[in-house]
Amino acid sequence: MPFSRDSSRQDGNRSGRSGNRYDNRSGSRPDDRRDNKRRMIYHRRKICRFCADSGLLIDYKDSKSLRMFTTERGKIIPRRISGNCAKHQRILTVAIKRARNIALLPFTTSIIR
Ligand SMILES: [Zn+2]
């Protein structure tokens, strides 16, 4: 009799433990992924070029330097990527739009597929 009781108890405990383990695994896996993503997202603060170099001036006639802040298709690179400060990005966008209007920069480029 005692033997049979022990065996039944052990079985019950085993099943319960296995269930708990499964729950823990399912719960912990997505958390780990999230943590990894957070670590991957880590980015360093870029410094605004125009703030760093007081000699650099934003001129709508200077298409070469404005081209640095546009993509290959002619789109203006956003502040979060270029690292410009809000003040200089505002001046830059106006300069790029002026340069586009007098055909120094493209509005877009045609890509033949
Ligand atoms: Zn700046």
Image (tube, rainbow, N blue to C red):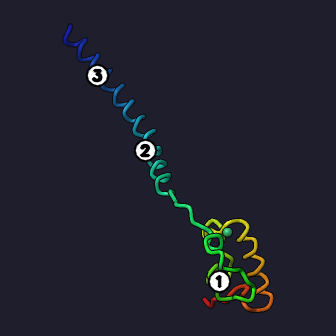
Locate the N terminus by quadrant. Answer: top left
Q: Quadrant of residue 97?
A: bottom right
**What residue lies at 29% left-to-right and 16% top-to-bottom?**
9
Q: Nearer the viewer, mark 2 or mark 1?
A: 1
Residues packed near mark 2 inside 10 Å, few (<14), some (14 to 19) or many (20 plus): few
Q: Which residue is mark 1?
A: 73
Q: Nearer the viewer, mark 1 or mark 3?
A: 1
Q: Quadrant of residue 55?
A: bottom right
Q: Nearer the viewer, mark 3 or mark 2?
A: 2
Q: Which residue is mark 3?
A: 11
Quick one: label 1 or label 3, which is nearer the N terminus?
3
Q: Is residue 76 above or below residue 106?
A: above
Q: Quadrant of residue 104?
A: bottom right
Judged from the image, the quadrant occupied by ligand 1 is bottom right
Rendered image: mark on residue 29 = 2
Q: Position of residue 88 (x, y in %)?
A: 71, 71
